[in-house]
Amino acid sequence: MALLDPPTRKLDGDGSVQVRLDPADRIGNAKVFAVYGKGGIGKSTTSSNLSAAFSMLGHRVLQIGCDPKHDSTFTLTKKLMPTVIDVLETVEFHAEELRPEDYMFEGFNGVMCVEAGGPPAGTGCGGYVVGQTVKLLKQHHLLEDTDVVIFDVLGDVVCGGFAAPLQHAERAIVVAANDFDSIFAMNRIVAAINAKSKNYDVRLAGVVANRSAGTDEIDRFNDAIGLKRLAHFQDLDAIRRSRLKKCTLFEMPDAPDVIKAREEYLQLARTLWAGTPALEATAMKDRDIFDFLGYE
């Protein structure tokens, strides 16, 4: 389960109260990725298409949505699934009464999907939710036959709770558009990932540029702090329509832009599977990034 750090433990950041990982709940041999980014930037679309791409390459994939909206996996499953917290509540939080089929559902091309959900508004901690989800998966031996785990995490919230997936992940991926707000949020996320890397194995993999015709500002920022762009997805109408149709890009009718985007996702999956170097990025102070990105 997730526990609060005792005062004697080295904290991830000055003045922080962190949710730490129970060593017994560590994910096994799967490659684990955590996807972060500004709210509404397309993290769930990116995560689901990336999960689909990994599956198309023959890997066994599990996607875990970490958002109370529980809409991370609906393009894979074609429906909004109940959350782990929802189903735990039905058995008065007696986890031993749950079966895997109560909270895990098979989606496109065999991708397994779980929606962790979140605590009721204003109560509880997202770290507890993530911890309970991983504990359930381990109790039911559902991680033993998994090659890839993708955590799709709520917005740009970087508190100790919603940063909890970073305690499980090998690499963190940031999704950003080529604009001020996305890059500002990315900078804060980089700081959070660096804080977690003091006590855990997670390291930065890089940036997925999304919903952007160009990448000049992302690339300029990356060069300044030590990040790298992993992929670029333009603002395609086919991607918007795939969400409306509740499906992945791999299920959309063939068209040149769709085929190109699919190949970009497949290449991203190949790159991540092969292993990416651990990037040593240094986040800017808020005032510095404001000056860096602002215009006179």
Image (cartoon, rainbow, N blue to C red):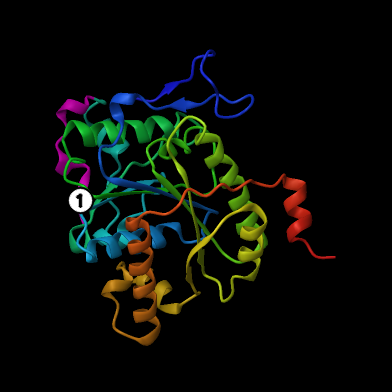
- Residue 267 is situated, as x and y percent measured from the top left of the image, at 36, 68
Residue 253 lies in quadrant: bottom left
Q: Quadrant of the C terminus?
A: bottom right
Is 109 located above or below residue 70 in the figure? below
Q: Residue at x 22, y 33 (%)?
A: 138
Corner quadrant of residue 45: bottom left
- On screen, residue 134 above or below 48: above
Is disc 1 placed on a helix, strand or loop?
strand
Examine the structure image and report whether residue 199 is included in the region drawn in magenta.
no
Q: Position of residue 58 (x, y in %)?
A: 19, 62
Q: To which residue does mark 1 refer?
A: 105
Identify the residue at image location x=26%, y=74%: 251
Left or right of 247? Residue 46 is right
Residue 249 image point, x, y percent: 33, 72
Magenta-highlighted residues: 94-106
Residue at (28, 61) in percent of width and height: 54
